[in-house]
Amino acid sequence: MTSADISVPGRVAERASRGLWRDAFTRLMHNGPALVGLALIAIFVLAAALAPVIAPYGPLEGSLANRLKGPSPTHWFGTDLQGRDEFSRILYGAQISLQVGVVAVLMGLAMGGTIGALAGSFGGKVDAVLMRFVDVLLSIPGILLAIGIVAWLGRGLPQIMFAVAATTTPLFARLLRGSLLGLREADFVIAARSLGASRWRILFRHMLPNALTPLIVAATLALATAIIDVAGLGFLGLGPPDPRTAEWGTMLTDSTRFLRQAPYLLLFPGGAIVLTAIGFNLLGDGLRESLDPRLKR
Amino acid sequence: MGKYIIRRLLGAIPVLIGLSVVLFAFVHLLPGDPTRAILGQHATPATQQALREVLGLDKPLWQQYLQYMGQLLQGDLGHSVVNNKPVLQEFMIRFPATIELTLVSLLFAVGVGIPLGRLAARHPQTWTDGVVTVISLLGISVPIFVLGLTLQFFFSVQLGWLPTSSRVDPRLGIEQVTNFMLIDTLIAGRPEAFVDALKHLVLPAIALGSIPLAIITRITRAAVLDVANEDYVRTARAKGLTERRVDDRHIMRNAWLPVTTVIGLQVGGLLAGAVITETIFAWNGVGRWVFSAITNRDYFVIQSSILIFALIFLAVNLVVDIGYAFLNPRIRYS
Amino acid sequence: MALLSVQDLVVRFRTQEGTVHAVNGVSFDLDAGETLGLVGESGCGKSVTNLAIMRLLPRPAGYIDGGKVLFEGNDLVAMEESELRALRGREVAMIFQDPMTSLNPVLTIEEQMVETIRAHRHVSRDQARDRAIELLSRVGIPHPETRLNSYPHQFSGGMRQRVMIAMALALEPKLLIADEPTTALDVTIQAQVLELLRALTTELETSVILITHDLGVVAGMTQRINVMYAGFIVETGSTTEIFEQPHHPYTVGLLHSIPRLDAREAGPLIPIEGSPPDQRQAPVGCPFAPRCAWRIERCWTVNPPLAPVEAISSPPVLSGPRATHRAACHNQPTAEEADAGRPLRPGFMPAPPPAGFSAADVEEAPGVAAYAGEEAP
């Protein structure tokens, strides 16, 4: 064996993983529900990106004389309590929901991923301590944790992002840790180690690509929950500090008092949240099926 | 098995300690000036100084923590900033209402979710399965507040079949004995009030239970499908047992295990979701109280409610884990 | 009349990538008290054939697409599910490869044995329990009364398989199908379990179909052997004849790929190169052609029928000690070639595939590499 052969395991794993992605992509393209999810997401991403261009009115534009009008040709989704155009506010609301959701999940991935990676690759005491910390986070269920953090840090978009990120952190930490712990004992890792590869090389070249798959699926599904949680915080009055901001959850708070007169105030923001969540859930499920071909369900 | 229980109990201790530290930090380490934040509009130099003494904010951190733990163990959870009543007392008054709602929601989620999951698993990849999958998808994609408001709109405002809010028609004048409305109406000997209380429970329970329902359905379906493909199910059929027997004794007895674990986890979601549900339906439980505490910056209330909810969640999961170990012979006899 | 007569059984599986042709027209008979071995590599259809006999194919993927299975004259394929259920366990029993996964982990041994007995006989729970104790001691489990309350994971592998045998023979069925009963066990335990199986089935006069890929197992236990490949039976005959005078290249290959104490000379092990065919396509020609060292042109296009190896005057005997030795091959190895493990005709080269033939693993010259450079004797 020449010295060139030592890097063979890595290269073989690379070639194998490139094939895996291509296969998964093809499978995904044939998955009906996943494509529907992708379409829904695309609609809202476009809505968010093009809001300044498509929206017929500004998000804060409105006069009290115009308040609580139902859907009409001039106001497709009607007007809200302050006479602002619902349709425009939904478009701008998409910006907040998607931005905050995505950043929150990315932060959660970073925080949880780091914790999990450290726990998984070092094991032993490091693992025990880190996982206890994760257990503490987990003991405070879902939105209660987010509420607590926002109550503590105060209102504001970065705080909301951090709060929602904290609720997703335990999931990612456990996932990554589980993958890494399992892979540590995997045959191909032992083989690589016996050929002299260093711990870091093993982590990045061999273990992470394999651990990536469940992470991608979990992140997509977490986006659905994140968007719902962001709206939930808004609904409870913990949303963006400026009460005029167009945010789907905050928009729903108004609707509670005017359910009889203006049900469209519930329909459109509520519908936006639901459709976005459905989109990410469908995509996430589709990714799970395409990335793990063994699951024939 | 005894060893497992002890290990599990011991493992819970660091989590409890960690939890207490986190919640301690919630009040004692508030960013900015804690006294100002806690007292809000009531903040005057006098009240701030009084609070500072109560919290011991001038003492070193570890002393504050010990003081906090001491108070906790004596049942002193602080006082509400709003009305200066002891938090623990106020909590216990409202707690039965939340338990009642949570239990009924759980019953709903389990009572509908498990049969639905079994049904889907029995006819995989058919229309039935598709419908169940859609119901599941909607359950996790529709937030509690959207579902709650929608239910209110249709069944209350539009159709008038069910009441919009609160726990029982106040005109019926039911005396609050246990604060479990269903029990109190029976104690008062008023069956029509019992029915009324049930009617008030329907919409909130559906809204709160929707997410657990969706998840329990999914897990049951997956568990049954997994087990149905196991070798021992094939053996059972090879012995000539009827499908009914195979289903009950061989498939379900094994499928129960992962399902019970999930049910335990869902209790957490129910407690958290109670905040939103009780707010929408004007349900006088802890959740609604926490919501107003958020608005009023009543930090002691928030801190203590989170603490108690977390403790309940931990306890439930402990029970579920031990129950699982008991039900699974591989753990029970190892 | 034969106890069991399988006639042209065809089994297919629906998968996401298409239909898999698992079993392609298999026929064989079995007499009362006979032990028949079903030999072949993984995926050749031996397990599927037997699951099909009891109609235990995984649903909805697997289905029987033709043929009959006559058990004591009644066609099991056409039977109602309720009638079939009465037969399962009572007249026809099956034991499986992995005793750990084949026993329900949350029920005690007592519960699993008693339910078997009470499913088919009207006896009280105590009576069934007594019978279970009796059976457990018959299969050599010490202290059966206490062990009844144990769970499967509390037994060792060999013990578990004994329990499975006890359960299977509880109602003294006429036919026992043993699917790789010892594959998951250690070698020393294997011998014990096989011996137990042989003793019990002889005593109860049970017919046995023994499925395995291990020729050693088959040699000691069976009177007749069916060799299967890619869903076909390629050779059938008495155990002695198969071992001493194989007539199908695949059988020859199998016998030469294991070390044998009775080999006439210490020759090299000759592996069969290549891999089994992709059964997602309907077979064209002989399924073994791509790997066969004896193949001629005809083999690529015409699937040879299972025919007697020597010309006979009367119709072939399908079962029993005088069963006719049959093989499905256009160009059968001679006795010397069977001994050597490769063709010995000077200048003979395996026929290349015809133009347009799409076989991924066609071995250009199967077996040549193994004996390149040797002189013909």
Image (cartoon, grey):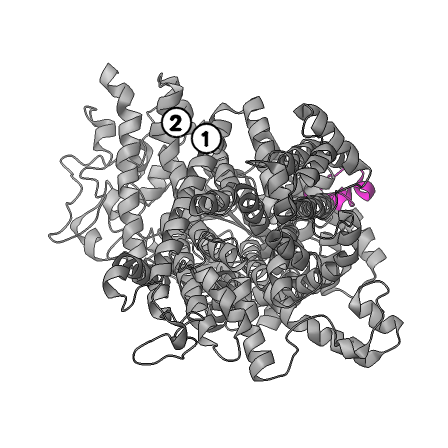
Against C266, residue B245 (above or below) is below
Q: Residues within 10 Å of mark 2 (few under 14, many from 20)?
A: some
> In the rendered view, does B298 fall on the left or right side of A69?
right
Is label 1 in a helix, a strand or a loop? helix
Q: Secondary structure at mark 2?
A: helix
Do the residues bearing badges 1 and 2 touch, measured as CB atoms within 8 Å?
Answer: yes
**Left or right of B324: which side holds A155?**
left
Residue bearing the label numbered 2? A203
Disc 1: host chain:
A
| A30 relative to C342, above or below | below
Q: Nearer the viewer, residue B243 or C262?
A: B243
Q: Which residue is mark 1?
A: A117
Report the residue at 38% width, 39% height from top. A212
| Residue range of the region highlighted in magenta in the rendering | C136-152
Q: Residue at x 23, y 45 (%)?
A: C290
Vertical placement of residue A34 versus C150, above or below: below
Q: Earlier in the sequence, mark 1 or mark 2?
A: 1
